[in-house]
Image (cartoon, rainbow, N blue to C red):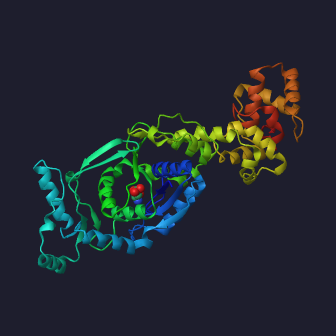
Amino acid sequence: MTTTRFAPSPTGYIHVGNLRTALMNYLIARKAGGEFILRIDDTDPERSKQEYVDGIQQDLEWLGLTWGRMERQSDRLERYEDAAQTLRDMGRFYECFESPTELDLKRKKQLNMGNPPVYDRSALALSEDEKTNLRAERGNGHWRFKLDQTRIEWDDGILGHRSIDAASVSDPVLIRGDGQFLYTLASVCDDIDYGITNVVRGSDHVTNTATQIQIIEALGGSVPGFAHHSLLTGPQGEALSKRLGTLALRDLREAGVEPMALLSLMARLGSSDPIELRGAMDAIADGFEITHFGAAPTKFDVADLYPLTAKLLHDLPLEDVAQDVADAGVPGDLAARFWDVTKANITTRKDFKGWWDLFANGAEPDIDAEDREFIAQAMTLLPDGPFDDDTWGKWTADVKAATGRKGRGLFMPLRKALTGQSHGPDMSSLMPLLQVIKARG
Ligand code: GLU
């Protein structure tokens, strides 16, 4: 069975970059009728917060990215200890005592000599006595996995065939000096135990993949299919990493972005398939193909989400927006007309309130100096409310007869006087919504 996972660390709220990963894994499972697992990578007790675990779940639920089960790495420390012991027993795991400063010095020396800064494995030469002394002096060491210095190869779902020389990579640290298991080991144990068949993640994980393939093999697991998607950049190709904080999913939700608009964009952005607005997850999953994604950095412009949101809203029936229309203060008997009149003139549901305020409390009239007398005269001809569908037609006919104005010179000043805007919904349909006309003076 196809099984995928999304594995965020709960050290912050998730953003569009994380969504790309979550969505790709979700769609692979959904398309194959498999399972999508939410895995919380919380082996770091200091940085992991329950608030973010809750936040991640809310954000995924908002988007409809539902998971078959949720697992937490902090529940599985015994399993990781067992795996560590297995690696020790195989002679693939060794304790090291270099401090960060010493490691840094080694790296600098290697770089100065023009060599790649790969850990020199000097801890492998330590005798048991030396280790006992170092432990007494410095506390417990950190543990590194001893890579097989061969080439590590895999067929990447996006990057194509990859071949990495293990000798060019440092033996990865899997347990820190303070005993904390690192993601590299925990993730491998989980992927094996949960039967993960496909892993999509960012291309910043390519080196991890190389080392994790060897760890999976050492622990007797089968290697999942890997695909590494490109990282997102801003619209100009600028690095997005610093701005991702402002692109948190909850902020987009708060700004009124519609889930299907966001999903429609993110499920195709960076692929050879066109971005088309879809109204349902199945339609998004149908055309999704991981191999259609390219390796080049993917440009993301948050502004693209708004036309998609507007387009999506425009086609919704009243029942899908009724709650938000009511929340904006629109009385039930006016809801259908309100939606009809405003839907072509809104970008997000957040705009309902502005329109209703305008109808309920009256717009500040926008009257050009040369139209002042004309508007004053027109107002004397405007009947008392409530207005109906015929009000605008009758009134403008009367104003035309009284003033001789016609066409744009007639209609535009009246629209601006009543709504404060030079564009907007059809005035005949809008009139019955107007509760207050400030231009009456
Ligand atoms: N917690 C890791 C991350 O957020 C997961 C990477 C993976 O998918 O294996 O980068």
Question: Which residue is at the front of the view, 52 or 27?
Answer: 27
Q: Position of residue 234 (x, y in %)?
A: 43, 41
Question: Which residue is at the front of the view, 33 or 276?
Answer: 33
Question: Which residue is at the front of the view, 312 or 404?
Answer: 312
Q: Is residue 329 left or right of residue 212?
A: right
Q: Is residue 439 above or below residue 95?
A: above
Regarding residue 270, the answer to whether it shows in the image is no
Question: Which residue is at the front of the view, 161 or 282?
Answer: 161
Quadrant of the rendered structure where residue 170 is?
A: bottom left
Q: Is residue 185 left or right of residue 68?
A: left
x 60%, y 55%: residue: 62
Q: Position of residue 80 (x, y in %)?
A: 36, 70
x 36%, y 45%: residue: 155
Q: Position of residue 41 (x, y in %)?
A: 42, 64
Regarding residue 25, the answer to whether it shows in the image is yes
Q: Is residue 33 left or right of residue 236?
A: right
Number of numbered discs:
0
Ligand 1 located in image quadrant: bottom left
Quadrant of the rendered structure where residue 388 is?
A: top right
Q: Is residue 438 above or below residue 99?
A: above
Residue closest to the far left:
113
Q: Position of residue 57 (x, y in %)?
A: 55, 61
Which quadrant: the C terminus? Answer: top right
Quadrant of the rendered structure where residue 351 is?
A: top right
